[in-house]
C-alpha cells in the first residue's frame, strides 16, 4: 500500500486539500513542493490521530472538522484535492465529488486512491453481505460493495 500512497502524492505542488484524511497516514508522504495541506476529517477519534500525525509532517498541515459533502473553504482555493479510501464512506458521493471540484483552481488535480466493487458476482455478493453486517461498523462506514469507480 505504501507504493500506491507514494504514487498518489508524487508530483503534487502548491496547496492541497485531503478529504477524509483518517489518521493522517499520508502526511509524511507529501512532497516538499506542497506548500500546505488542509486535512478534512469529521470523525473525532481519527481527527485527533491526524492532528498528532500532522506534527510529524515535513509540510504544514491543518486538520479541520468539515465533511466531504460540505467544505467550508472558498471556491477555487486549492491546486489539488486528494481522496484516499474515503469515497466508500461518504453518504453522498456526488456531493463529495462536486465539492472537491468546486474548491479546485482551474487546472487543478483531483487524485484518488480507492477500492472498488469486485468484478465477479460471487465477490460482489460477499461484499454486499459484509456491507449489510459488520464491515461498516468495523471500518468507519466503509461500503466495500459501492461502485466507486
Image (tube, rainbow, N blue to C red):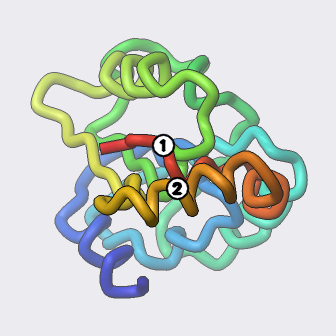
In which quadrant of the rendered view does residue 80 lie?
top left
Residue in front for this viewpoint, 148 or 53: 148
Labelled disc at residue 125: 2
Which image quarter is the C terminus in?
top left
> With 3 as the anchor, is 92 left or right in this view?
right
> With 75 as the anchor, is 137 left or right in this view?
right
Task: Give the image location of residue 41, x and y in percent.
Answer: 69, 44
Please, is residue 72 above or below residue 97 in the view? above
Please, is residue 65 above or below residue 60 in the view? above
Task: Give the image location of residue 47, x and y in percent.
Answer: 79, 53
Task: Give the image location of residue 104, x and y in percent.
Answer: 29, 27
In which quadrant of the rendered view does residue 109 lie?
top left
> How many callouts does the rendering have?
2
Labelled disc at residue 53: none
- Residue 11 in sight here: yes
> With 48 as the anchor, is 2 left or right in this view?
left
User: Sequence-wise, which precedes: disc 2 or disc 1?
Assistant: 2
Q: Which residue is mark 1?
A: 146
Q: Secondary structure at mark 2?
A: helix
| Point 38% across, 13% down: residue | 75
Residue farthest along the front direction in this orientation: 122
Q: CA distance from mark 2 to mark 1?
A: 12 Å
Category of crowding for the residue at label 2, using alpha-carbon neighbours closer than 10 angstroms: few (below 14), some (14–19), many (at least 20): few
Which image quarter is the N terminus in?
bottom left
Residue in front for this viewpoint, 80 or 67: 67
Residue in front for this viewpoint, 14 or 85: 85
- Residue 51 in sight here: no
Task: Give the image location of residue 111, x and y in percent.
Answer: 28, 49
| Point 38% across, 42% down: residue | 148
Amino acid at each position: 500500500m505504501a507504493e500506491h500512497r507514494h504514487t498518489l502524492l508524487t508530483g503534487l505542488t502548491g496547496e492541497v486539500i485531503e478529504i477524509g484524511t483518517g489518521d493522517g497516514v499520508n502526511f509524511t508522504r507529501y512532497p516538499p513542493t506542497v506548500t500546505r495541506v488542509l486535512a478534512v476529517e469529521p470523525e473525532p477519534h481519527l481527527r485527533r490521530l491526524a492532528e498528532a500525525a500532522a506534527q510529524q509532517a515535513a509540510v504544514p498541515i491543518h486538520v479541520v472538522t468539515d465533511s466531504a459533502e460540505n467544505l467550508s473553504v472558498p471556491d477555487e482555493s486549492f491546486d489539488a484535492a486528494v481522496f484516499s479510501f474515503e469515497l466508500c464512506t461518504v453518504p453522498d458521493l456526488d456531493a463529495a465529488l462536486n465539492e472537491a471540484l468546486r474548491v479546485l483552481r482551474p487546472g487543478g488535480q483531483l487524485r484518488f486512491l480507492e477500492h472498488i466493487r469486485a468484478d465477479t458476482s460471487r465477490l460482489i455478493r460477499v461484499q454486499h453481505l459484509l456491507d449489510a453486517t459488520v464491515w461498516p461498523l468495523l471500518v468507519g462506514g466503509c461500503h466495500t460493495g459501492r461502485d466507486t469507480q
